[in-house]
Amino acid sequence: MMKSTLVLLLAGIAAFLTLAFRPAAEPKTQIFLVGDSTMSEKADLTKPERGWGMEFGQYFDGSVTIRNTAVNGRSTKSFLREGRWAKVLEELKPGDWVFIQFGHNDSKAEDSVRSAPAQTLYRQLLTKYVQEAKKKGANPVLLTPVGRRYFDDKGKRKDDHGAYPSVVREVAKAQKVPLIDLHEKSWAMYSAMGEEGTRPLFWSYLNGYYQPNPVAPAKNDNTHFSEYGATRVAQLVAQSVKEQNLALASRLARAPYDGKYAHDLPVVLEPVFKKDTFNLTKYGAVADGQTLNTEAFRKAIDACAVNGGTVLVPRGLWLTGPIVLKSNVNLHLATGALVQFSAKPLDYPLVSTTWEGEEAIRSQAPISGVDLTNIAITGKGTFDGAGDAWRPVKKSKLNDSQWKTLVASGGVLNDKKDFWYPSASSLKGNQMAAAGTLPKGTDPKNLDDIRDYLRPNMLSLTRCKQILFEGFTIQNSPAWTIHPLLCENITLRNVTAKNPWYGQNTDALDLESCRNGVVEGCTFDVGDDGICIKSGRDEQGRKRGVPTENFIIRDTKVYHAHGGFVIGSEMSGGARNIYVNNCTFMGTDVGLRFKTARGRGGVVENIFVDGVDMTDIAGEAILFDMYYAAKDPVPLAGESTAPPVMKAEPLNEGTPQLRGFRIRNVTCKGATTGILVRGLPEMSIKDISLENIVLESKKGLVCQEAENIRLKNVTLLSTDTAPVMEVQNSRNIALDGIRYTNGADLLLRVTGDRSKDIRLANTNTKQAKKDVELGQKVAKKTVVMAKR
């Protein structure tokens, strides 16, 4: 008894000492926001108005607390007289920060309660706020008033704040405190977006969807922000904190990408819809799988588009021809709804469109929209594109039993009997010289005999804005599955795309010449590339000159596909600022696939990948290839596997460029090659960083015609170790902290008379039978090995 009592006593003393001497938690840094309605919290979140201070906290880490004391309608004068500044001073502690932004209400000369003339009282009160914050040991920051959306009749900037911004700048300089020139920064953003493009920043853009009184005229408010606008302004302020390297910058939230912060990432505007619902059945639709409901879909969408709302597709099997979307319509598929598109090509008129990055005449897409704003497809139902009625099939992609079954089902074979086509019309189109594209000026009436060949992409949007795709399954596409072209502000969330693994050209997602978007929580299992970034092909793509940019791709799984995440090969307009995080590729031919070819032109740059896991990759886990030849990435039976002839050609506008990739935290269990980098002799692949990577594969690293390549903490568990790493005609290659299979035959082979500046550091070279082998034309000083 005494022993157990003693044990308990000692345990209690230990617990007390642990608590008594535990280091105190570091106090959080407080940022007080002092200002007006453009900054303040809003009590009623059912209304669309937001202050930028409400969104500011997302750009800081957990060590910062935002204290938003800003109040609607206040000026420097009224905020002080109401005792609000005194309350802030009471709570300020040394080391806290105070962001001060006034001016919107100070300028109201007719209002004696709030008016503070710029050169006198406004200047005096700003100085007072700064000096009193300093006395409390806090860090004041002055902000010029955020811009109002004032454009003249020519779409040019109008004066919106008079002398007030200048006074703020002068006070900041005189008091030697940081200045965030939010007036100029916001106007730089407004000018870049244009008069029409800035409307979504302000809450009255959404007025029609939130009016308390539906019969009241819409209010035109060019001062107060929507959630999107408030977020964009908060982003500007956070970026300024970083740009000025304020001490507070160490507390900014980092993004999961090398060197990036949360405020660097794109902000995406989602659509908003009225609550009115239009049930498809009220427009004559019949869910029997036999009745063609094309006209019912048209009528329901037309009715909904008048004032906006949702078209509801209830549970059931709905046969239809093409569906054409309209602005302000959310097409919602209820759980259990299956929209089955017709398998008859004649149900799809021939239209002017694009095909694989070039202008073309094709059949109308099963789902399409042109020049639309504020659109969505949502719900947990399914679209089936009847792709089997359109797609040709290679014999080499099926086993004998599957091939015999397919041939017996109908259709025709080519002369070699190695390609099946759904019809003679489809075969005839494939035998044309311009297979795949036809001149846009072609008269569709002259194409009736090959219309079966002109298969469409399944979901095609052109020049649309504010797009939401969420929750649905889309399958059995005739060609590309989801294809936004020249679109902005795109959200794909929890969408599933499924196509047969042998399906020709059945990419899951092709983002072509689009800007600003997020793809998250999706699942893709298709016959061609999974997630694909494009921007037009060759001369037409370069002439268009619109890159795909500012996309976040995260939390997405890709099963069968030619590539998990892909850029190219149609990238002639360029691609930049793409962020990929937390994705899984299982059984794709290639994992990360960056492909292009001579003639494409275009620049791909600023690509960030962090957190990709892969299994059972048939080809390369990570591939940079400037010799794309429009073949399957893993050669089929009988196809040539010979490497390309690497001979320099003159530089021209068709010379593509791949540069500025940051890839971290990648694992792959099973691949033919871990990393293949293959540039052009006249244009090397440049500035690639690969860090914290583990790859289990047959071959390790092959690097040809590359420059400024850095591998750090990369593990190459290759079975072919003669060599583990091969470098040919490449320059400035840093191999730092390389781990590899113990007992490897050769760690590094360097060939090519243009190879130089290759550094091997922090690597145990002794576990290989031979560390370095140099080709005949490689100088001994080319490779420098730093001792471990």
Image (cartoon, helix red, strand yellow):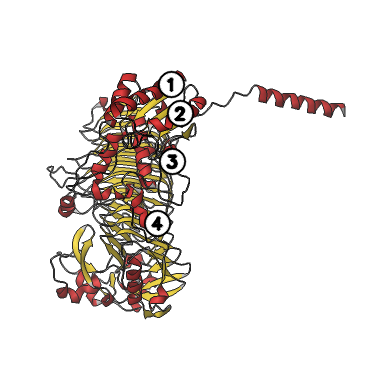
Is 265 above or below relative to 165? below
Q: Which mark sits nearer the N-terminus, 2 or 3? A: 3
Q: Please indicate, yes or no, whether residue 747 appears anywhere in the rendered image.
A: no
Mark 4 and mark 2 lie on one chain; the one further toward the N terminus is 2
Residue 85 got which mark?
2
Splitting the image into 4 quarters, where does residue 347 fall? bottom left
Q: Earlier in the sequence, mark 4 or mark 1?
A: 1
Sequence-wise first label, 2 or 1? 2
Distance from disc 3 to disc 4, alpha carbons, whole Å, reads 22 Å
Disc with the residue nearer the chain's start (3 vs 4): 3
Measuring from the top left, give residue 91's x and y in whole percent. 51, 27
Q: Which residue is mark 3?
A: 54
State the separation of the CA atoms marked 4 and 1: 42 Å
Which residue, given by chain and number where applicable, does mark 4 sit on?
211
Q: Earlier in the sequence, mark 3 or mark 1?
A: 3
CB atoms of marks 4 and 1 within 8 Å: no
Residue drawn 38% across the image and 73% down it: 340
Q: Are marks 2 and 1 in contact (CB under 8 Å)?
A: yes
Secondary element type, mark 4 = loop
Alpha-carbon span between mark 3 and mark 1? 25 Å
- Mark 3, mark 1: which one is toward the viewer? 1
- Given the image, on which type of amino acid does mark 3 rest? Met
Q: Are marks 4 and 2 in contact (CB under 8 Å)?
A: no
Element assignment for label 2: helix
Amino acid, disc 2: Trp
Residue bearing mark 1: 132
Mark closer to the observer (3, 4): 4
x, y percent for residue 146: 32, 37
Task: Give residue 375's quadrant in the image.
Answer: bottom left
Question: What quarter of the picture does the N terminus occupy?
Answer: top right
Q: Secondary structure at mark 3?
A: helix
Q: What is the CA distance from the residue labelled 2 to the residue labelled 1?
A: 10 Å
